Image: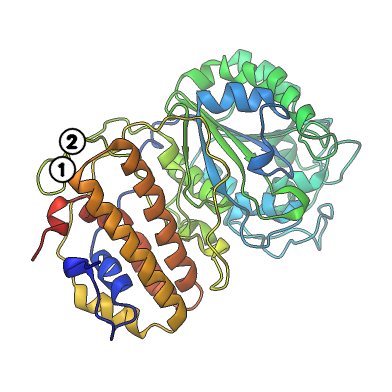
Amino acid sequence: MTHERHRPGGSHLVLAVGLVMALLATLPRPASGEGLLSIKTVFVILFENTNWSQITSSAAPYIRNTLVPRGAHAEQYFTPLGSHPSEPNYIWLEAGDHLGLTTDHDASASNSTPATDHLVRYLENAGITWKTYQEDIDGLSCPLNSSGLYAAKHNPFVFFQDITDHGNPRSAHCIAHNRPYAELATDLQKGTVARYNFITPNRCHDMHDCGIPTGDTWLKNNLPAILNSRAYTDNGAVFLVWDEGTSGSDGPMPMIVLSPLAKVNYSNSIAYTHSSTLRTMQTIFGVGPPTNPFLRDAAYATDLSDLFASAKPGPPQSGAGATPSVEPPPVPKSMEPPKGRALRPSEPPRQSQPPSESAPPKAAPAPTVATLDLGALEKRLRETKAIGVFTKLALKNQVDDLLEKFRAFHRSPDQGMLTKLREAFDLLLLKVLSLLQDSDPVLARDIASSREGLWHILMDPATFKNP
């Protein structure tokens, strides 16, 4: 079958990929952070060792049947590559790296960090209040050591020497910010909760020791106090996060967002890591650029803004890219693989878990398309050593197939077909990025940053007209 001007010549093995990917060369990256800046109060609740596929109606009925339809969730949320066991993941959520703390040992002089560039230090410097509520601590000392069902490895803040006054169990600063979980209910009632609240259930309630149903029941019994509070209803947000996948896997783990500002009954398949959560917190509280850099790997991550509704959606665009008879599916902000979870050339793209029952909301308008330098990117793709000859041939066939599907869609627009096209488009882009990321990260980033521009072009019927 002939594919008009999209069909590559046989002498250029990568031309089919190039002709599609070359459209990405100079398009602007969509702005991130929309929908986050209106959030006033954050509650992060950490659970343990669970894959998203395990959050089923039978194992976790409250989460699956009540919370998931109420909010937005990610189906491709991972630990940074190989970040295990628990402790380094908690440190990562605070600092964008494990900082060399790669065991599950309690905090000590040798198992702590003098680093002062981390989230809550940035918050304090900006005059923003924060507190961690740890279940089963007594609140009388800085909880440097595990005791009973309290695990220090699940409390990232005790590993930062500037928080603990260099590991002092009597540190007033540490004690003031590390409070027993039982105090949260009173603080909610009095309206005295901090703006950033990090909540860790004990080892049983966090699903680590006692399983998913126990954690689900704990959440059912405890979360309503937050959801009914003024701190939540006045543009608050709850982030339900899991530290790592089951049996030490990278995931995907659950990531669920509840907020008056969150999309409802929504899911996406954007690749996220803990760096995404950290970047999101820096954006919410305004402690990222230009005042501070995004912390380490958070500089390369995609934030969670796609899970939130924009406060002021722009008007629909008209013109070359418009397809008036069909509502577009949700358009994720970015597909750039976070640096900490770069896909290896030999690693296939990660597949989503079975789709949820959610219905996609309306998407933001497509970005404006800039002038493209097709030849330059074709040349880069031909010359890159990151993709082998046989892989390029396989990609060529997949690109041809995808283009033919777009052509058929433009002949007879259909909402169901468009949703499937978006899924196929995302998977193909992720595959290309996975092949490029380690060996040619600059090219990978150029492609990732222009992903939505390519979608816009493919949605333009004029793209598929005969020359």
Which residue is the site of mark 1? Answer: 322
Rendering quarter of residue 248: bottom right
Q: Is residue 247 left or right of residue 96?
A: right
Q: Residue at x 27, y 75 (%)?
A: 377
CA–CA distance in space, label 2 to label 1: 9 Å
Choose between 363 and 177: the one closer to the eye.
Answer: 363
Q: Is residue 310 left or right of residue 51?
A: left
Say which mark, if any, is on residue 316: 2
Q: Residue at x 42, y 27 (%)?
A: 261
Q: Earlier in the sequence, mark 2 or mark 1?
A: 2
Q: Residue at x 75, y 22 (%)?
A: 217
| Other-residue count near label 2 (Cα within 10 Å), few / some / many at <14 / 14–19 / ≥20 | few
The quadrant of the rendering that contains the N terminus is bottom left
Q: Report if the CB atoms under discs 2 and 1 are less than 8 Å apart.
A: yes
Q: Secondary structure at mark 2?
A: loop
Can you see residue 32? no
Q: Is residue 56 left or right of residue 17?
A: right
Can you see residue 402? yes
Choose between 365 and 303: the one closer to the eye.
Answer: 365
Q: Position of residue 191 (x, y in %)?
A: 57, 17
Q: Secondary structure at mark 1?
A: loop
Choose between 412 and 70: the one closer to the eye.
Answer: 412
Above-or-below relation of 297 to 319: below
> Which amino acid type is marked by label 2?
Pro
Q: Residue furthest right?
A: 148
Q: Position of residue 116 (x, y in %)?
A: 60, 56
> Which amino acid type is marked by label 1?
Ala
